[in-house]
Amino acid sequence: MQNEAPVSDLIAPPEVRPPVNGSNNGHENGAEAGSEPVAVETAPVEALAVEPTPSEAASGSGHGVARDPDYEPPRSAISEWTITILLLLFLTTTLVQAFVIPTGSMEDTLLIGDHLLVDKLAYAPSGPISRFLLPYSQVKRGDIIVFRYPVDIRQTFVKRCIGTPGDRIRIINKQVYLNGVRLDEPYKYHKTDYIDSYRDNFPSEPNLTVDRRAMEMLVNNVVNGEVVVPPNTYFAMGDNRDSSLDSRYWGFVPRENIIGKPLIVYWSYDAPTDDLNEPSLSARHVVDLGEHFFNKTRWRRTFMLIHGYPIH
């Protein structure tokens, strides 16, 4: 899954002051027009409203001018845009972040080309005060989670949380059993009919090369034929069960790797994985957008909310 998202001094215009005692000195006006804008990064705007410019301080012309204490100078267009950009930057790096789905491991819940907004506060550690103000929650079974891939944290994955700390997990002929109970999973899809000895009967002896973390899981966390999820970790699987690189192949998701959970599909475009995996927009993808934007956009998925499915 590819991160899609990702300026800035707030500038206030110089204040033009009326001449004192009828003075309309050309030198003073020229200095006023040419004065540099005042940076407001550390001083409040109200304080700048009565502060003389450098030319006024040198000539003393700013003293004795009556002022309305409630007067605030209008913000310039640059100031307005700067504030907007700062707010957007704050929101996209702290509250939500945009991602795109490049592979089909979560089909048909999430499709290749779905562009998501991810809530980064949902699972954030709560502080002594913020826990009463912000909607923090624990990761629950059935939640769709976005996380740093344990094998390579530069990559971002999205899967469904199947097991939380202490849970026992076993798969028999494609059917998941959680704590000894067969799960009802209306969200999952099996797109192959054959039974794979490892993928569909888990845990068992791997029939392909798996990551060392998966081998450690099979050696250290299997009790009576079930995988037991250790503290501060989670067992995650893709909804496209037969085509998902998930905890069966690379082990548990550490709690600190979890970024958040997807909120909404704000745009869905039918594009190939190769185009979506590019670090930047390729010329081929730009041409494809120009030619097929309207007929390849999945309009019915626009602004579609994303929900987990409670697993008990």
Image (cartoon, rainbow, N blue to C red):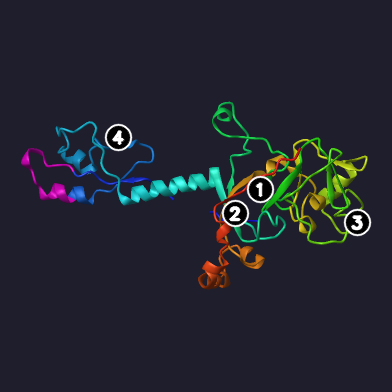
Please state which of the two labelled residues, at mark 2 or mark 4, is closer to the viewer. 2
Quadrant where the N terminus is found in the figure:
bottom right
Cα gap from disc 1 to disc 2, whole angstroms: 10 Å
Tell me how many marks there are. Answer: 4
Q: Which mark is residue 46?
A: 4
Secondary structure of residue under mark 1: strand
Crowd around label 3: few <14 · some 14–19 · many ≥20 (10 Å)? some
Residue 14, magenta (yes or no): no
Which residue is identified by label 2?
A: 99
Magenta region: 17-30
Q: Earlier in the sequence, mark 3 or mark 1?
A: 1
Camera-side residue: 58 or 186? 186
Secondary structure of residue under mark 4: helix
Please state which of the two labelled residues, at mark 3 or mark 2, is closer to the viewer. 3
| Residue at x-position 61% and y-position 66% | 271
Please state which of the two labelled residues, at mark 4 or mark 1, is closer to the viewer. 1
Secondary structure of residue under mark 3: loop
Which residue is identified by label 3?
A: 197
Amino acid carrying label 4: it is Glu
Evaluate if marks 3 and 1 touch, with contact meaning CB atoms under 8 Å apart. Answer: no
Evaluate if marks 1 and 2 touch, with contact meaning CB atoms under 8 Å apart. Answer: yes
In the figure, is residue 285 to the left or right of 148? Answer: left
Secondary structure of residue under mark 2: strand
On the image, the x and y values in percent for residue 114 come to 61, 58
Q: Earlier in the sequence, mark 2 or mark 4?
A: 4
Cα gap from disc 4 to disc 1, whole angstroms: 43 Å
